[in-house]
Image: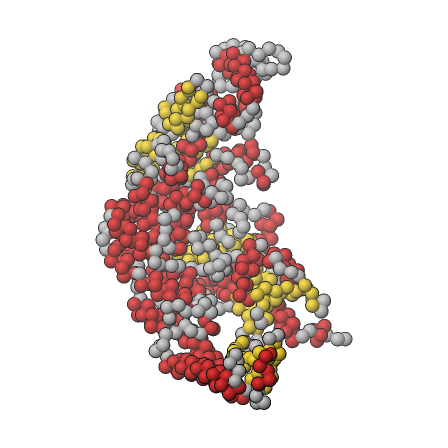
Amino acid sequence: MTDPASSLTPAMRQYMDAKKEAPPDAILLFRMGDFYELFFEDARRAAPLMDVVLTKRAGVPMCGVPYHAVQSYVARLLEAGCKVAIAEQMEDPRLAKGIVKRAITQVISAGTVLDDTVLNAGRSNFLIAVLPGKARLGVALLDVSTGDFRVTEVADRAGLETELQRLHPAECLLPETVHTRWQAEGWPDAPAPMVWTPVDDWLFDLEMARDALCRQLGVASLDGFGCRGLDVAVGAAGAVLSYVRNSLRRDASHITSLQVYQNDAYLVLDRISQRNLELVEPIFADARDATLLGVLDHTATPMGGRLLREWILRPLRDCAAIGRRLDAVEAMVRDPLLLNELRESLAAVRDLERTIVRLNVGSAGARDLLVLRHGLAAVPGLRALLGGLDAPLVRDLAAALADLPELTGLIARAIVDEPPLAIKDGGMFRPGYNADLDLLHRAAREGKDWIAQLQAKEQERTGIKSLKVRFNKVFGYYIEVTKANLGQVPADYIRKQTIVNGERFITPELKELESKVTGAEEKSKALEYELFQALREQVVAATAQVQATARALGALDVLAALADVAARNGYVRPVLTDAPVLDIRDGRHPVLDHLMRQERFVPNDTLLDVEENQLAIITGPNMAGKSTYIRQVALLVLLAQMGSFVPAKSATVGLADRIFTRVGAADDLSRGQSTFMVEMVEAANILNNATPRSLIILDEIGRGTSTFDGLSLAWAVAEYLHDHAPVKARTLFATHYHELTELALTRKGVKNYNVAVREWGEKVIFLRKILPGSTDKSYGIHVARLAGLPRAVIDRANEVLANLEGNAINEAGKPRLARSRRKAGGEEPAAQPWLFEF
């Protein structure tokens, strides 16, 4: 029987071998000349995702993409959730004997991307692994593009979900058995478009993980990193390391440290609060400036941009740690000239973190060495500037900076100011760096001079003034003669090609000169490649120092950005305390304060504690500013705990362990839940998880059901928050249920506030000011008028409202009972007693 493989071409057999070596779920891009080719099912699957034509050759489905644009096509496949294996040509096809050798050089998944054209410079790209244990879940996270490697453990699935929402990972590794179980039971709540990736269970083996991590980090024990007792976290870290090594197809030498962190060191912000407060992503995609990140991001470096995002999503819970950040920001605010110089110096620094990683994994070019050189060259000046700032954190960060003068000097001596993009093109090194390279460059130059002289000589010998000596990659050097002059071509010319306007020839002398020129050029390119690899090895030996410097520069950049925002916008330093209080004078919403250029934002006070001012009931009309105000308070607490100044006249902030928000459900309707169900699920989460150290903001609890059901639930929730000792959190409760204001009569911790309104005839002016006391006017019809409802509808609504308030509607299908009359003890329907009079 004939072996099917025997009918395949050598190249196709090579492809099939590579396909067997690639992960079974990966799409294989197979380099053939100037294209990456895809075959069989990979081609069918990838062609529509990459928007290329699917064709057939000898019955085999195939498609291809040009090699110089491959990263853009890889990005499309990754966005579609695919994994990609790259098979490269391992030798020059011109020098190959037989079929060109090819091998898989990398496997790219969402969490192992290294290419800058695919990565977002302003956010980390975390690959994480999760290992459920008997009592806790281990979590390991690694940003492959920077070497940032951390581990922690969480108590339960809810803790895992919180961590996923904080990290926004690109990919999550799970033991295959866990992946299968969670697929059946339901996935934890994770931010889109994170990819769940099953891997072999044995990759999480504890002993294998310990051994691999110790070898990677060059230590005998992980105890020095704080890993004692964190077995499931160590198992997860081992799986991450193994997965990355397999993806890179080489040692991950840029992973030089491991950090253990504790989740209780950070204020918890779940997915709902991140969305409702619009911290880093706007609710509407085209409004990035309308986020807290958009306001604060005055960073000058990519490292700072990524770290700022993390600080926003992971505010601190330790007064001393927050104080260190605030001391640094205050020192910078006090010296605006120094701050400006500092920011200008930081602007000269590019992405050192990701550059040193590309050099480690072999994907960097000569231009990356210049990025490193210029970034490190800025360090001495930065260190000198920082010496003028009296803040412990600044001193610590300055001490972590390494300028590495020997390394920067070496790069300066070696690499030209404008090197080519590709290291195999040559032209990277300065004259004088290597004597052998200089000789080869001289030989190539002289050969080209000889060829130019040959053109002049042949023009003279033949009398053909238009004769040209040209070059292309297919034919090498040749002599081109136009049709009009073909009769003057000497007998020793050898015809090589006929073209539209004439013919091309070669001569023995020309080919001899070509051999000298191209031989010298090829040898010089090969030598440059060797020299570059040797230089790269010298540079990567300083990886740990460069990474530490990059991290310190990122932190300095964030502090400088916060200082710049504070100085420009009149922010003040908050006072942090462990007491459960919140006292803000003239607080402003940081985003709206930034966006409102044409009018002044109206500031407001806030006073909350767990005794006399624990629950603030806020009433007032739609569009008056209730929702803005309660979000504002949450943002000011977050700003304070991340170490930022705040937009206020003064602020005393008692540390919060969590910020809970219930202010809308637009995001969750696609999950198949009604608005009211989403509202109740979010309320349940708050009531079941809040503590006396939490901050809660509630907007319109109970609005998604009937009036009496909604009022009943809102009343019960408010009572629970006030009366239930394990909760009793500082709470802002905005509502249209004016009946809730009666709680202040029976509970000392409840205080009523309203949003000031001024009436001018039929006009209503919203003053945006929060005042003590309650109101029972909603002005809903006025808002409807502003929204553009027809005049007839507005007039009829006013008529119905007057009838309802005056108990004047007749029996023709219209309600008769006004709330004011019920409360006064008037007519009462038997089936619906006044709910809160017992």
Visual colour scheme: secondary structure
| Residue drawn where x is 62% and y is 70% of the image | 15
Task: Tally the numbered discs.
Answer: 0
In-image side of 395 versus 292 (left or right): left
Q: Residue furthest right?
A: 1
**Splitting the image into 4 quarters, where does residue 643 fall?**
top left
Q: Position of residue 429 (x, y in %)?
A: 39, 74
State which quarter of the image contains the N terminus. bottom right
Q: Is residue 9 above or below residue 724?
A: below
Q: Is residue 616 visible?
A: yes
Q: Position of residue 652 (x, y in %)?
A: 31, 36
Q: Nearer the viewer, residue 782 or 443?
A: 443
Q: Nearer the viewer, residue 642 or 793?
A: 793
In-image side of 171 versus 768 (left or right): right
Q: Position of residue 646 (x, y in %)?
A: 33, 40
Q: Is residue 538 visible?
A: no
**Splitting the image into 4 quarters, where does residue 530 fall?**
bottom left
Q: Nearer the viewer, residue 302 or 182?
A: 302
| Residue drawn where x is 44% and y is 55% of the image | 121
In-image side of 708 versus 378 (left or right): right
Q: Position of residue 62 (x, y in %)?
A: 66, 65
| Residue drawn where x is 47% and y is 31% of the image | 699
In-image side of 753 versus 818 (left or right): left
| Residue drawn where x is 35% and y is 27% of the image | 612
